[in-house]
Amino acid sequence: MKAKLGRLFLWAPVMLLLDSPSAKAQEPLEIVSAQYGTDTSSIDVTAQVRSLVRRNTLYVTVAPRILGVRDPMPGVAKVLRVQYQVGGNRYEASAADTEILSLPGSGARRGQDGGRALGRRRDGLRIVAATYGARERLIDVRQLLQSRAQDGRLELQVTNQSMGGDPLVGQPKALHLTYEWEGREYDVVVPEGQSFSIPEVRQRGEPARWYEGAQEGLTGFWRDNAGGHYLIRQVGNRIYWVDDGRPKYLNVFVGTARGRIIDGEWADMPGGQLDHSGTLRLRIESNDRLVKINSSGVPFGGTVFTRGDQGPR
């Protein structure tokens, strides 16, 4: 009898431990897909992320070395985006370079913290476009800023570290940000070293310049920093151009302007030696200057477009 009681008291703590919530088996965590990169250029890291799952949990610091891949875009801020499934429900989560992604997280079932249910609106704040740099040296930081938005707000000091790198060493830079809040788009330019908080129009230090509304009047002769010459026509919010660089190339572009952002597609036409195509996202800095934010497909040569005094060659 004493032996039996001894066994009972010996196993009692073990049974209590096994019956505790933390010791119960977690529901299986299935990594559906994983992409690492920017909005327009990324690599598939599904297999690598799956290999990092331990006991139905993923806890990883986002970095090429830890993911086991080469840096797909050195010097550019990147984001790891993961779609995963727990208990029959699918979620997505993301984390920027050097941040920690923990899945499923305490709120995975509700689509919070460890992930959000697919199709759920991101708390009313959407980063439409964001670039950091100066002149023609810009890096795309849209995904980086979106990943740092919390509860529909984003508050940050603009530094090389917070923006994920220094695109132009030794030169003053600025963050150009376009965001959507409650169905309306706004633009802000924040110089390096200053802080901002959105959606409140609140600045620390010298006020940054705020803009609202679409730009007009882009029709005319333009040129880029790669030697291209353009005939641009704006009709409402539609943007068209022809870049005649024959005999080497002849390309056309069709895009749509929303606020200060132009999204569109370009393609080389018969008559030139090239046969390429792709997409472009441009920022309207003024009626006399456009800047490329990003592109997909074959890289587009020009990055800064300025109005010219005369037509193409």
Image (tube, helix red, strand yellow):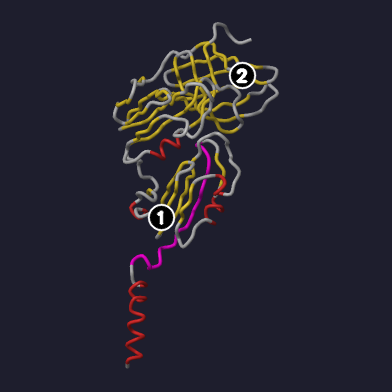
Q: In this view, does 302 lie to the left or right of 106?
A: right
Relative to residue 81, is residue 201 depicted above or below?
A: above
Relative to residue 171, is residue 98 depicted above or below?
A: below
Depth order, front residue of 207/145: 207
Q: What residue type is labelled 2?
A: Ala
Looking at the image, do the residues carrying marks 2 and 1 touch, with CB atoms under 8 Å apart? Answer: no
* Image x and y of residue 178, in percent: 40, 27
* Image x and y of residue 179, in percent: 38, 30
Number of marks present in the image shown: 2
Q: What residue type is labelled 1?
A: Pro
Q: Residue at x 36, y 85 (%)?
A: 7
**Considering the image in quadrants, where does the C terminus appear?**
top right
Residue 24 highlighted magenta (yes or no): yes
* Image x and y of residue 22, in percent: 36, 65
Labelled disc at residue 226: 2
Of all residues, the one furthest to the bottom in this rendering is: 1
Give the residue at mark 1: 104
Instruction: Say few, some or many: other residues with alpha carbon within 10 Å of mark 2 (under 14 / 14 to 19 / 20 or more).
Output: few
For numbered disc 2, what is the local secondary structure?
loop
Q: In this view, does 297 lie to the left or right of 235?
A: right
Depth order, front residue of 133/140: 133
Q: Which residue is drawn at 55% across and 49% down?
A: 67
What is the spatial separation of the Cα atoms under label 2 and label 1, in whole angstroms?
47 Å
Mark nearest the camera among 2 and 1 is 1
Q: In which quarter of the image is residue 230?
A: top right
Relative to residue 194, is residue 86 depicted above or below?
A: below
Q: Quadrant of residue 1?
A: bottom left
Among the two numbered marks 2 and 1 on one chain, the one whose residue lies closer to the N terminus: 1
Relative to residue 63, is residue 206 depicted above or below?
A: above
Q: In this view, does 98 lie to the left or right of 9?
A: right
Query: Magenta segment range?
Result: 21-39
* Image x and y of residue 227, in percent: 62, 16
